[in-house]
Image (spheres, grey):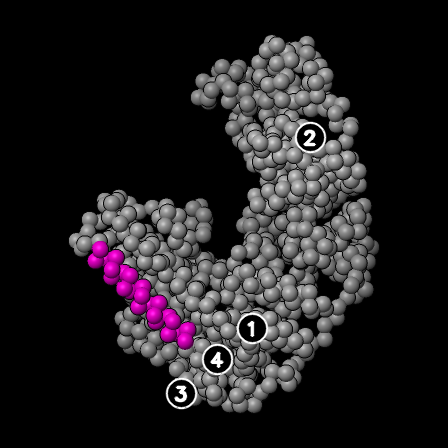
């Protein structure tokens, strides 16, 4: 799966970015460059799905793809998919799987949800078996505090919670592949049963370490998708992430700018208040435009200008700002082009996606 | 007050283990105590129980942060809540929180480094301290196998804290190390409680081979013959991984994992708990594994590589057979084994060039405040090397209170003195290592040989003594536990994990009836 994800990234980046852009994307680097790449190139779903990936493992993968003629690494380190790589990517069977990653959406939830759930399961199954001293499998203080609070609230209905979580997990896991369900269950820790480490899972299921890591993330994303979009009714599992959904997925600085904007301040006023350059504030606005589909960009980019830019993007199938700017004879600022790209994304993307 | 009642009340045990009662009763009578108790004999109870009884807080200085954190976790898990571990790994806000409510803790674990912080010591001096415990007290002694410079200053700290009762604990201390502990702590009147380190249910054996391949073959043979909980010790991370994968390919029906300090925290925790829980049969580990491990039925401890001194070896072997059943220590020896150990010894202290370069650098920075992280990075030092150097530089007044001083000695003289000291210590460590090497090739009883420098007598062995007296590893008859290997599909596994199997059906049915 790791290889497929990397190939898909290279394909979508259209030869316009270097390999390290992919590395930053997968490890979830919170820089505005990486966030923008994720949005412009429709790679949001892969953002931060492999946080522990180390650089040498990544380069190993790139080299391997290069040696197999799936990709070409150019002198400036930009990466391009070859014919061979393209036909491989088109043929792979887990295309549908890959589309279920929801990296950027769940980036901050994935780990917390997972750790809370795991620790709570460990807690209730042990308490139910009258074992009150066990070592917590999560070291994260905030997770421990959260689980303790939930446990204190529910300790009189432990049977109900054990059965409830069991049933909901059973229903969700039944919609997944045998392997995914098994991997997830093997990873769980309960009473007298400690979960397997990633290394052990990799060996047991004959996968690479990265593949197991990706599979664990994918399982959680699929779960969250089902729970959030109500494909599964949930009374229990939803408790483990409900409070996290409110958080928005923009940088803290952009959030401040957005607040001021909502209060009615203009760009130049915000620059003065926040003592920031205009270009920085523009970065924030683009960031918000990508996240919030209801953010009204009309003031900065009138409709007809947006249509103009969209047209060029679709015609030339490029998202490279410099090229778009060139095709439009430098008529619009980069800021406007970026806002237009954000809008395209909300309108369901260009035709290009349908090819994959 | 009956101590047994207190023990039952706070820990649920009905009787003390050897040595505990005497030590605790001396402490409660405000006597300073040096306790030498073997690994696994329940040393920590000697201060955990007093912490429940005496007025004021108990401070425990412990050099092993991971052990400290494990203990605090276990205490909290067992319901002992007013306990905290204060070390350099706490974040700023966690530390501030702990400081703020310092007087609410009955048991305060601290790393020796923290006690170098004047603000922290001052804070401690404002609360009532009922007992000051020095765990792993052999680290005080320059001749101890794990000398820690920070431990040398403990006598000052004890004075600064208004001389509370002192308890020094260790599992391994020769008579000369014991004398040194008393001397360094300036507590000549300490009461000594020395207990035999020899465990009568452990049998010793050594097998030597011409080359490493034969050694691995024999390892596989022994492990195949005895499906018992086993730890295999290595002196490098790399080796744990290598041999673990060899074993996996050659022993198909056993669960095997490796463990070392370089692994991710969660992964380490899982592997450690799997072993404790009996899910793993064999663990290939470095010395990082085992501290704070409380598994009763480890039957076999194999040293694929030797540690660097007898004391560590005894400590590692002591993790076997805590349930009193027949257990074995097996050492596998091959030519050139000593190379790795010697390398480890050399790497522990800085090289001559490192000392020279650092001293010249500091000499050019007089008057500045040292930046530890920067220096560690610049001179490629390990944490232990830096602690050693800092202590030496402070001794030579080159650093005072983190400030680089103008020297009163020629810098060359200081470099010379430090390097001479390093040479001396390395020579001492080679000698310590040679002791263990000699033990491997000993002609007569291994048990007597191993413990001779610590105690005059050895216990009558409960099962076998050693390969020189009465034992052959291939004829051992350990207790074997039935292990039911089930291969369930995920649905059955999930059901079992959530206790929804046959015997639990009742609960879920009642619940369903309720709704």
Q: In terms of sequence position, does the residue under pointer 3 or pointer 4 come before the other?
A: 4
In front: mark 1 or mark 4? 1
Could you tell whether B31 is left or right of A242 in the image? Answer: left
Give the magenta-colored segment's residue range.
B412-434
Image quadrant in which you'd find residue A293: top right
Residue topped by disc 4: B440
Secondary structure under the numbered disc 4 in the rendered image: helix
Dot 2 falls on which chain? Answer: A
Identified at 71% across, 33% down, the residue is: A82
In front: mark 3 or mark 2? 2
Secondary structure under the numbered disc 1 in the rendered image: loop
Dot 1 falls on which chain? Answer: B
Q: In terms of sequence position, does the residue under pointer 1 or pointer 3 come before the other?
A: 1
* Label 4 packing within 10 angstroms: few (<14), some (14-19), many (20+): many
In front: mark 3 or mark 4? 4
Q: Position of residue B155 (x, y in %)?
A: 29, 65
Q: Is residue A322 visible?
A: yes
Q: Are marks 1 and 4 in contact (CB under 8 Å)?
A: no
In front: mark 1 or mark 3? 1
Q: Position of residue A163 (x, y in %)?
A: 76, 54
* Label 1 packing within 10 angstroms: few (<14), some (14-19), many (20+): few
- Which numbered circle lies on residue B450? none
Residue topped by disc 1: B211
* Mark 3 and mark 4 on one chain: yes
Q: CA distance from mark 2 to mark 1?
A: 54 Å
Dot 3 falls on which chain? Answer: B
* Label 2 packing within 10 angstroms: few (<14), some (14-19), many (20+): many
Image quadrant in which you'd find residue B57: bottom left
Q: CA distance from mark 1 to mark 4?
A: 16 Å
């Amino acid at each position: 799966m790791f290889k497929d994800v990397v190939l898909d990234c290279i394909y979508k980046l259209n030869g316009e970015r270097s390999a390290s852009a992919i590395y930053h994307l997968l490890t979830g680097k919170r820089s505005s460059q990486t966030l923008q790449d994720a949005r412009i190139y429709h790679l949001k779903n892969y953002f931060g799905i492999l946080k522990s990936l180390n650089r040498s493992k990544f380069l190993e993968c790139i080299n391997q793809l290069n040696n197999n003629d799936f990709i070409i690494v150019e002198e400036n380190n930009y990466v391009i998919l070859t014919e061979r790589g393209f036909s491989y990517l088109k043929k792979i069977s887990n295309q549908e799987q890959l589309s279920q990653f929801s990296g950027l959406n769940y980036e901050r939830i994935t780990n917390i949800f997972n750790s809370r759930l795991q620790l709570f399961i460990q807690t209730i199954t042990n308490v139910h078996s009258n074992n009150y001293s066990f070592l917590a499998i999560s070291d994260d203080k905030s997770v421990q505090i959260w689980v303790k609070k939930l446990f204190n609230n529910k300790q009189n209905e432990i049977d109900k919670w054990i059965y409830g979580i069991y049933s909901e997990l059973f229903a969700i896991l039944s919609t997944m592949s045998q392997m995914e369900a098994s991997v997830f269950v093997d990873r769980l820790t309960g009473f007298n049963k400690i979960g397997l480490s990633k290394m052990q899972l990799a060996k047991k299921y004959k996968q690479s370490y990265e593949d197991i890591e990706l599979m664990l993330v994918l399982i959680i994303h699929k779960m969250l998708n089902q729970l959030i979009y109500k494909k599964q009714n949930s009374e229990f599992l939803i408790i483990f992430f409900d409070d996290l959904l409110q958080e928005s997925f923009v940088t803290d600085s952009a959030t401040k700018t957005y607040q001021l904007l909502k209060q009615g301040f203009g760009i130049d006023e915000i620059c003065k208040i926040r003592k920031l350059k205009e270009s920085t504030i523009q970065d924030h606005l683009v960031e918000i435009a990508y996240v919030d589909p209801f953010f009204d960009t009309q003031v900065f980019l009138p409709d007809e200008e947006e249509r103009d830019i969209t047209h060029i993007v679709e015609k030339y199938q490029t998202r490279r700002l410099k090229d778009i700017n060139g095709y439009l004879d430098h008529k619009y600022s980069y800021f406007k082009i970026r806002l237009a790209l954000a809008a395209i994304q909300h309108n369901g993307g260009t035709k290009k996606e349908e090819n994959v | 007050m009956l101590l047994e009642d207190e023990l039952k009340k706070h820990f649920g045990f009905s009787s003390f283990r050897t040595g505990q009662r005497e030590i605790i009763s001396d402490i409660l009578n405000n006597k300073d105590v040096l306790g030498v108790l073997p690994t696994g004999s329940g040393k920590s109870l000697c201060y955990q129980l007093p912490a429940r009884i005496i007025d004021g807080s108990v401070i425990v200085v412990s050099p092993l942060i991971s052990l400290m954190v494990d203990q605090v976790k276990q205490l909290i898990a067992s319901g002992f809540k007013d306990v905290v571990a204060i070390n350099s790994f706490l974040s700023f806000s966690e530390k501030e929180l702990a400081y703020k409510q310092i007087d609410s803790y009955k048991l305060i674990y601290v790393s020796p480094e923290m006690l170098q912080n004047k603000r922290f010591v001052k804070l401690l001096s404002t609360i009532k301290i009922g007992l000051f415990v020095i765990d792993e007290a052999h680290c005080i002694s320059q001749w101890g196998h794990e000398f820690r410079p920070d431990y040398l200053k403990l006598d000052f700290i004890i004075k600064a804290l208004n001389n509370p009762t002192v308890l020094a604990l260790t599992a391994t201390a020769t008579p000369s190390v014991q004398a040194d502990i008393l001397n360094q702590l300036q507590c000549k009147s300490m009461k000594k409680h020395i207990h035999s380190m020899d465990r009568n249910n452990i049998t010793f054996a050594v097998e030597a081979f011409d080359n490493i391949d034969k050694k691995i073959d024999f390892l596989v043979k022994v492990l195949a013959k005895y499906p018992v909980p086993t730890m295999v010790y290595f002196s490098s991370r790399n080796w744990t991984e290598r041999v673990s994968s060899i074993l996996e390919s050659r022993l198909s029906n056993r669960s095997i994992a490796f463990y070392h300090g370089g692994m991710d925290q969660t992964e380490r925790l899982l592997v450690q708990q799997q072993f404790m829980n009996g899910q793993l049969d064999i663990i290939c580990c470095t010395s990082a594994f085992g501290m704070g491990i409380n598994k009763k039925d480890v039957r076999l401890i194999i040293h694929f590589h030797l540690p660097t001194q007898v004391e560590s070896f005894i400590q590692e072997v002591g993790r076997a057979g805590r349930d009193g059943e027949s257990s074995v220590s097996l050492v596998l020896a091959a030519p050139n084994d000593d190379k790795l150990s010697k390398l480890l010894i050399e790497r522990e202290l800085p090289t001559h060039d490192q000392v020279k370069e650092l001293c010249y650098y500091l000499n050019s920075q007089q008057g500045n405040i040292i930046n530890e992280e920067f220096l560690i990075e610049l001179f490629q030092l390990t944490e232990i090397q830096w602690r050693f150097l800092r202590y030496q530089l402070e001794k030579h007044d080159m650093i005072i209170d983190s400030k680089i001083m103008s020297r009163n000695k020629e810098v060359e003289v200081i470099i010379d003195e430090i390097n001479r000291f390093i040479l001396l210590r390395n020579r001492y460590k080679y000698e310590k290592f040679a002791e263990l090497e000699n033990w491997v090739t000993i002609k007569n009883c291994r048990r007597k040989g191993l413990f001779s420098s610590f105690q005059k007598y050895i216990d009558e062995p409960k099962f076998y003594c050693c390969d020189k007296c009465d034992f052959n590893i291939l004829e051992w008859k350990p207790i074997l536990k039935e292990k039911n290997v089930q291969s369930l599909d995920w649905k059955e596994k999930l059901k079992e994990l959530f206790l929804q199997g046959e015997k639990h059906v009742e609960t879920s049915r009642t619940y369903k009836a309720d709704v």
